[in-house]
Each structure stands twice: as structure tokens, then as C-alpha cells.
Amino acid sequence: MTSTEPGFSGNVANSGILGFSPDGSAIIDEHARSEYNALLARYADKLLVRTPQDAGLRAANTVAGTWLMDKEHLELYGVMKAWLRGGK
């Protein structure tokens, strides 16, 4: 991912990946968390390791309803989104 621009919910730029931490983790909102968990359920059979819901996430202490996604699971999220776009 190269963009650091957040997604839009209506006319407000506050949806999806909101930013990045210095350690490479992403700051995400509840929408992105829900999408990530849905992708984990959809692609469970394709993953080499069983990955439970909310794997790699922890609540961010800055803004309610935001989460930190570690770098490893951020990469997995990107792979699963590519699978979805590719029709897998």
C-alpha cells in the first residue's frame, strides 16, 4: 500500500485505514475491522495457518472505535483484498 489517505464514509474521510504507526502497524476503523474479519471467514480454507477473528488487532488507545493492525496481518489483509478483487 502506498496511499496514506483514508477512505470515505459519505463525505467524511474517516473510513478504512486511517494512518500508520512508526512500527508499520495500521490504524483502522470499525469498518476495516469488520471487512478484515469477513475476509478471514471467506478465505479460511486458503490460509496456511488458522487465523482467528481479530488476529493481529488491538484496540487503539487514541480514538474510540479504532484499532491497531500489526504489520503481518496488514499484509494478509492486503492479500485477501486482492483475492476478492480478483474474483477468488
Image (tube, rainbow, N blue to C red):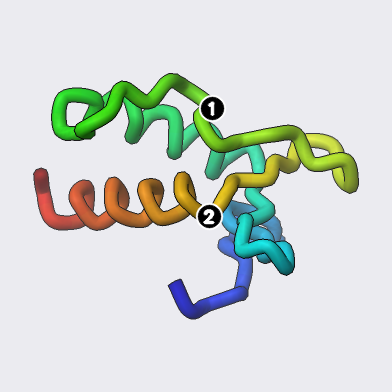
In terms of image quadrants, where is residue 22?
Answer: bottom right
Upstream in sequence: badge 1 or badge 2: 1
Task: Tell me the residue at 69%/34% (across/down).
Answer: 58
As drawn, is 5 to the left or to the right of 48? right
Query: What's under tag 2, amino acid-wise?
Result: Lys
Disc 1 to disc 2: CB gap under 8 Å = no
Reply above or below: 32 against 34: below
| Residue located at (31% from left, 22% from top) | 50
Residue 25 seen from this side: yes
Q: Position of residue 33 (x, y in %)?
A: 55, 36
Residue 13 coordinates in the image, percent (x, y): 68, 64
Drawn side of residue 52 relative to residue 57, left or right: left
Q: Secondary structure at mark 1?
A: loop
Q: Is residue 10 visible?
A: no
The residue drawn where x is 19% and y is 50% is: 83
Q: Which mark is residue 71?
A: 2
The Cα–Cα distance between marks 1 and 2, rounded to whole angstroms, is 14 Å
Secondary structure beneath dot 2 equals: helix
Image coordinates for residue 6, horizontal then vertical, percent: 62, 66
Q: Amino acid at mark 1?
A: Asp
Q: Identify the residue shown where x is 44% and y is 38%.
A: 36
Question: Pointer 2: residues within 10 angstroms few (<14), some, or many (20+)?
Answer: some
According to the picture, the residue beneath numbered tag 1 turns out to be 54
